[in-house]
Amino acid sequence: MAPVEPARAAPRAHPARWWAAAGMRVRSTVAAVLVLALIAVATGTAGLLVLRRSLLETVATSALVQARLVRVAVTPGVLEGTDPAARARLDALVGADEARGTHVQVVTDGAVVTASRALSGLPPLSLRLPAVAEDEVRVRTLPALGEGPWLVAVLGASADGRRYTVVVAESTAGARATLRTAAVLLAGGGALLLVAAGAATRVFVGRSLRPVEAIRRTVDGITSTDLESRVPVPAGDDEVSRLARTMNAMLARLAASQRAQRRFVADASHELRSPVATLRAAAEVQRLHPGATAPAEFADLVGGEAVRLERLVADLLLLARADEGAAAPARAEVDLDELVESEGARLRASTALEVVVRTAPARVLGDAGQLTRVVRNLIDNAARHARGRVVLAVHAAGPEAVLSVTDDGPGVPEAERERVFGRFVRLQGSRDRASGGTGLGLAIVAGAVAAHGGSVRCTGARPGPGAVFEVRLPLAAQEPDGADDEPVGDEPVGGGQPPSAASR
C-alpha cells in the first residue's frame, strides 16, 4: 500500500495580490477608513493631551487659590493660640472644601497647627516636600493620600515672628474622570465616524463607478464584426465622461479602419480579378482556337497583363507594409533637386510632352527609394493627364523643401482634391484602366510623404486649366543664403512613349 502523503496547506494569498483583487470600491473604502482613522487618532490624542493639561492647570489654580485664602486667614495670635476667634475662622476655612476633595494643613516648626479631617493625625505633608521660602509657591504631585494622585500646592509665609507652611492637596479624581469620559466619547464617536465614512465611501464610489461598469459591459459586448455600438456618456465633464467620449472616439476610429480595410480588400480583389480573368480568357481562346491569335500578339497580351498584375501586387504589398508600420523610411540625406532632375530626364525620354524643370538646391532627410517613388508617381500621374506640358519645380521655403508637379490637363474638381489620395480612387473622367491606372499611385505618395513628416495637397493650376500637386518635406539642414529664391533653370524636354502607372 502506497504511503499517504500528508495534506499540503493551501498557499496563503500574498497581501499585494489580495489588495489588487479586492476591487476599487473595497480599496477606496479601506483607504478612506485608514486615513480617517489615523487623523482621528492623531487629533483625538492631541485633544486629550490638551484637555488633560487644562484640567490639571485648573486643579493647580484651585489649590493655589485655597492656599492663599488660608494664608490670609493666618493672622497674629493664631499660631500662638491667643486669638480663639481667628483660630475658629481658620479651622472653618481649612475644612470648608473638604467635601470636594480639597485638604489643607498648616504646619509650623514641624508640627501641624490645623488640618482638614482627612489629614488629621497625619504627619506634616511639608516634610515630604522641599523647604519653601516665604511667598514661594510650589506645586507637587503626591500619590499617598488615598484615592490616587493628588496635586499639592505649598505656600510659605510668616506670622508672629514664626515661619509656617500652608499645604493644600487637591484631588485629581474629577479631572481624571472627565478625561476618561472624554476618551470614551472620542473613541465611540470616532468609531461611529469611521463606520459612517466607510459606508458613505462605499456608496459614493459605487455610484461613481456605475458609469464605468456600464462602459465595461458595452465594450464587452462589442465584437470585431460590429464596431458601430457606442458606450453611454454620462452627463458632466468629469474623468468618467471624458473616458466614455475617448472610448467612443476610439471605437469610431476602429470602425472607420475596419470599413477602410474591408473596402481595400474588396477593391484589391476586384482589381486583381481583371488581369487574372484576361489571362484565363486569352489562354482559353488560344487553346480552343490555336490559330486565331498570332503568337506575338498573344505574347504581348500576356506580358502586358503580367506586368500590370505584378505592378498591382507590388503596390498592394507596399501599402500593406505601410499599414503595419514596416515601411518606416531610412534616414539619410537626399538631394531632392537631383532626384527631380533625374526623373525629369526619364520623362523626357519616354513622352512627347513638353517638360519644364525648375530646381534649386534642397536636401531632405529620408529614404531615397521611397522619395523616388513619390516623385515618379506624381510625374507619371501628371503625364497621364497632361495635354502637352508638365512643369516640375523644387525650391526651399523656410524650413521645408517644396516639390510641385503641374500639368495642363483637365484638373481635379475641388470636391475631389482630398479623396484623390485614397486607395483605388479614380475620378469619373478616367475610370478606364488604360487612362486611370489602378488608383494606388497617389495613395502611395500620401503614405510615403506622411512617413517622412511632410504633407501633400492638390490644387488647381493658376492660371489656366490643369492640376498642381505640392509636396512639402522638412529640410535636412539649414540651407545657405539664397535657398529661398525662386527656382531657376527652365529646361524644356520632350520624348515619345506613354508614361507608366501612377493614377489620379
Image (cartoon, rainbow, N blue to C red):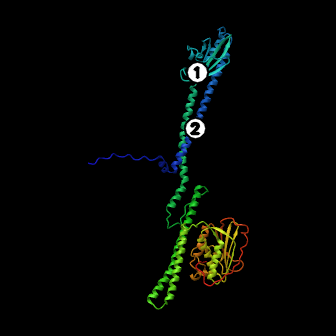
Disc 2 on helix, strand or loop?
A: helix
Q: Residue at x 55, y 32 (%)?
A: 181
Report whether 129 appears left or right of 216: right
- Residue 272 at what x, y percent from top left? 51, 78
Q: Residue at x 38, y 45 (%)?
A: 9
Q: Is residue 100 visible?
A: no
- Residue under pointer 1: 99
- The three-letter amino acid code for the residue at tag 1 is Ala
Answer above or below: position of 50 versus 334.
above
Quarter placement of the C terminus = bottom right
Number of other residues with Cα within 10 Å of mark 2, as a class: few under 14, some 14 to 19, many 20 or more: few
Question: How far apart in space, not on screen, are marks 1 and 2 (Cα)?
Answer: 37 Å
Q: Are marks 1 and 2 in contact (CB under 8 Å)?
A: no
Disc 1 on helix, strand or loop?
A: helix
Disc ID at residue 42: 2
- Residue 259 at what x, y percent from top left? 54, 70
**Name of the residue lying farthest toward the top:** 82
Mark 1, mark 2: which one is toward the viewer?
2
Answer with mark 1 or mark 2, whichever residue precedes in sequence: 2
Q: Is residue 396 visible?
A: yes
- Residue 282 at what x, y percent from top left? 48, 86
The front one of 299 and 149 is 299
Answer above or below: position of 120 versus 445.
above
Report whether 20 appears left or right of 503: left
Residue 137 figure quarter? top right
Residue 189 figure quarter? top right
